[in-house]
Image (tube, rainbow, N blue to C red):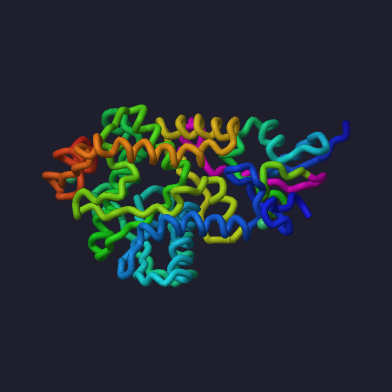
Amino acid sequence: MRYIKVHVNGNTLIVPLNTRCEDLMKILRLNKEAYLPIIERKPRPDDCYLNDGDEIHLIRITIHEESVTKDEKGL
Amino acid sequence: MRRVCDLCGCSEAVVTSSYGKAMCKDCLERSIIRRSFAELRTGISEGDLVVVALSGGKDSSLALWCIYKYRELSSVEFALKAVTIDEGSPYRRHAIEAARSLCKELEVEHVLVNMRDYQGISVSDLLRLEHLPNKRSMCTYCGVLRRQTLNIVARKLGANKVVTGHNLDDIIQTFFMNMVRGDVNALARFLSRATPIRELIPRVRPLLMIREKEIAAFVAAKGITAHFGKCPMVRGMRIRMRRALDELEVSSVGFKSKILPNMIKILDKARSDLSMRLNLHVCERCGEPSAERICKACQLKMELRGLI
Ligand SMILES: [Zn+2]
Ligand SMILES: [Zn+2]
């Protein structure tokens, strides 16, 4: 199997070639409804294929977990 | 070119629609205008003074953009103002700044009010407490007091319509939460176009049929000034409901868009039985709209007596 390297929110990940945006969300155990994927500075649809070297930002648009630490609560 | 739009076949897609179609920015814009204008056409009339509840987040910023476009493209003439309520929460600074910038860009009058000036309490006062009374969450105080403040300010400005940024996700979550709680009063008022008392200014929700993810993608693609952060203090049933509904949307595509018309159909059918519950009163203490003798805002403030 061939692999590509992508950068997600500053972390480098190795994923199989032909990974789509929604596959990446599944790998990261994220619900795709809760995140807006920005790939190479543009929002992209769920079935967009990732390219080698892509700069990806996953922006949280809704909250699925309650904050646990005082810090996270913004206190 | 990356994934191409399924509708026009010529531009790069920015989001997947509720029906599983990839859409480009322009096709998404047409779709958002079509859906939001349908709500605005029934909600806004000639000569209205419309106040947009602008938090500075992506939803209310898009709601302001939609009504701004509506004023530009339709023949209906109405006055437009935006109101931002500063609840005194430390996380709101960036959003308030975004609200201010967007109003400047669109040349819409912006009214920024301090919640403490109207309620005597701010979120920062509540944050100083070790525990909130009766195990209540911060969202309860913030939501109830903000909503009432908005109504008071809009009335003071002479508004006869209030536009909010509630989206498809918010509406479905609220419906299911009211079902779970068995809150018949809230269900009776839910999405009702009737104005039971003159103290309550009618709400118009241009984003009612638009999914939160489409809103986020459009605001980002179009470059509409908005803050994307979420309140870190949010907790309670809404979070669990959101997660459950998002899981349903992922496993059965289009769930959210398909369920809303059915919800409206059921509520319309039940409205005659629910109508006896639609009667809002005015609060005995403050005179604001209330489902009970004493409104929720006054109840919360009474609980805090001696603590702040
Ligand atoms: Zn298109
Ligand atoms: Zn009251």
Q: Looking at the image, which residue is at 26% across and 47% down?
A: B121
Q: Residue placed farthest to the left in the image?
A: B284
Q: Which quarter of the image is occupied by the C terminus of chain B?
A: top left
Q: Is residue B12 magenta?
A: no
**Residue interval drawn in magenta:** A51-73
Residue placed most toward the observer, B133 or B221? B221
- Residue B142 visible? The answer is no
Question: Is residue A2 toward the left or the right of residue B293 in the image?
Answer: right
Can you say whether A15 is above or below B109 in the image? above
Q: Position of residue B146 (x, y in %)?
A: 31, 49
Which SS type dominates the magenta stretch? loop
Can you say whether B111 is above or below B190 in the image? below
Q: Position of residue B235 (x, y in %)?
A: 42, 34
Question: Is residue B211 toward the left or the right of residue B130 in the image?
Answer: right
Q: Is residue A59 magenta?
A: yes
Q: Residue placed farthest to the right in the image?
A: A1
View quadrant of ligand 2: top left
Question: Is residue B193 toward the left or the right of residue B262 in the image?
Answer: left
Q: Looking at the image, which residue is at 32% across and 42% down?
A: B190
Count the numbered circles shown.
0
Residue placed most toward the observer, A30 or B49? B49
Q: Position of residue A70 (x, y in %)?
A: 46, 34
